[in-house]
Structure formats: C-alpha cells, structure tokens
Image: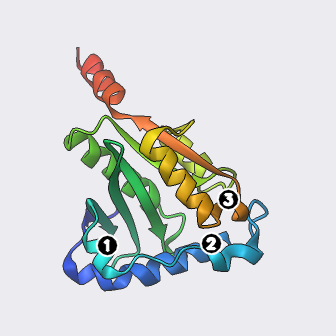
C-alpha cells in the first residue's frame, strides 16, 4: 500500500520538478502532438501548490502528487503527477482514491477533472476509477476554455470528467443495509 499523505511544506520544493518529469510520459504518445509538448503550461510553483485546496503526496520524498482545487462548487483534480520512475506502481490510482475520499469527507457533491481523452493513463485510466466524460458547464466549462486558450487542445483531444460523490455515498449506505 503506497504511503499517501497530505503534503508538508518540506514537500513543496520537490513537486514542480516531479510534475515536469511526469509530463515527459506524454512524449512519443501517438495520441499527442509531441512537437507541441513544450507549450504545456509550466508546473505550479511551491507558492501556488501551498495555496491548493488540498494537496496529497505519495512517498517521502514524493514520487507522485495530487492537487485538488474547487471549481463550481465541486472538488476538482487539477493535477495528478507520477514520476516516470514510479509509474505503474499504483501511486496514481491510490492518489485518485485518496482525493475521492477527501472530497467525500469535505462534503463535495462531485470530483471533476480535465484530461487528455485518448492517452491510456489519462481519460481511460480515470474511467477505470469511476469517472465519466461530461459536457462541461459553468465553471468547469470556463476551465476547459482556459485550457484551450493555453493550447492544450492543440496537443491532444481534451475532455472533462466527473465522479458523482453523492451517488457513491448513497451506494455505500445501500450496501450497508
């Protein structure tokens, strides 16, 4: 079981480089225009990360992290990064599960995210975690517009996804009866 925990101030300095390393996993993917990867937004700095609504890390020092913000009254998985040397070890899945648990405990109705549609470790991975593709509305649509303005849609097809936490909580309660 991976060591998933809230990030400490001492973790913050590691995370920008971890995010940049994670982005290298997209290079050479047939679903991605690798020539445009240099146009990805720069990783968040320690100050921006410290201001996140919730920040989880895996390992010490961190080998992966999840950054959760709030968008349109829902928890929003803004970033999930796994260092290439730690890929395929279950850290991403454990972080997603921890983010879902945290969002449920915090009382959010859903956890949303935006990701590349066809990269196996993006939308198909999140689908396997219970997320579904949605047509973004409200603030989530604004996030998608900002992504398009930053050029992410030119790199590869993007989608918005959501997991309904109220339904999960209801299912868990029904299972206990």
Is residue 28 depicted above or below 136 in this figure? below
Q: CA distance from mark 3 to mark 2?
A: 18 Å
Q: How far from the left and from the top, in percent, is residue 74?
A: 33, 42
Question: Few, some or many C-alpha atoms within 10 Å of disc 1 (few <14, some 14-19, many ≥20)?
Answer: many
Say which label, 3 or 2, has the lower sequence index: 2
Give me the residue at 72% from left, 74% from top.
36
On residue 176, the disc is: none
User: Does the image show residue 3?
Assistant: no
* Viewer-nearest of discs 3 and 2: 3
Q: Quadrant of the C terminus?
A: top left
In this figure, which residue is indicated by the disc labeled 3?
153
Q: Position of residue 136 (x, y in %)?
A: 53, 40
Q: How packed is label 3: few (under 14 Cα within 10 Å), some, or many (20 or more)? A: some
Helix, strand or loop at mark 1: helix
Q: Earlier in the sequence, mark 1 or mark 2?
A: 2
Please state if 152 lies on the left or on the right of 86 as rendered: right
Q: CA distance from mark 1 to mark 3?
A: 24 Å
Label 2: which residue?
A: 25
Residue 149 versus residue 13 in the image, above or below: above
Judged from the image, the secondary structure of the residue bearing numbered disc 3 is helix
Between 65 and 4, the one nearer to me in the picture: 65
Quarter of the image for residue 37 reads bottom right
Which callout, 1 or 3, points at the residue further toward the start of the chain? Answer: 1
Asked if residue 98 can be seen in this view, the reply is: yes
Q: Which residue lies under the disc numbered 1?
A: 49
Circle nearer the viewer, 1 or 2: 1
Task: Kindly indicate whether the residue at mark 3 contacts the one at mark 1 (C-beta within 8 angstroms).
Answer: no
């Amino acid at each position: 079981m991976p060591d998933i925990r809230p990030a400490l101030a001492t973790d913050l300095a590691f995370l920008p480089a971890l995010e940049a390393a994670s982005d290298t996993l997209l290079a050479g993917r047939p679903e991605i225009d690798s020539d445009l990867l240099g146009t990805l937004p720069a990783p968040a700095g320690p100050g921006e990360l410290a201001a996140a609504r919730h920040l989880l890390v895996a390992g010490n020092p961190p080998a992966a992290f999840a950054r959760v913000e709030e968008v349109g009254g829902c928890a929003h998985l803004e970033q999930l990064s796994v260092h290439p040397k730690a890929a395929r070890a279950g850290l991403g899945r454990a972080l997603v599960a921890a983010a879902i648990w945290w969002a449920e405990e915090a009382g959010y109705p859903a956890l949303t995210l935006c990701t590349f549609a066809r990269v196996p470790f993006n939308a198909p991975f999140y689908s396997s975690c219970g997320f579904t593709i949605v047509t973004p509305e409200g603030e989530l649509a604004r996030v998608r517009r900002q992504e398009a303005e930053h050029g992410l849609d030119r790199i590869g097809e993007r989608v918005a996804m959501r997991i309904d936490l109220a339904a999960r909580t209801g299912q868990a309660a029904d299972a206990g009866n």
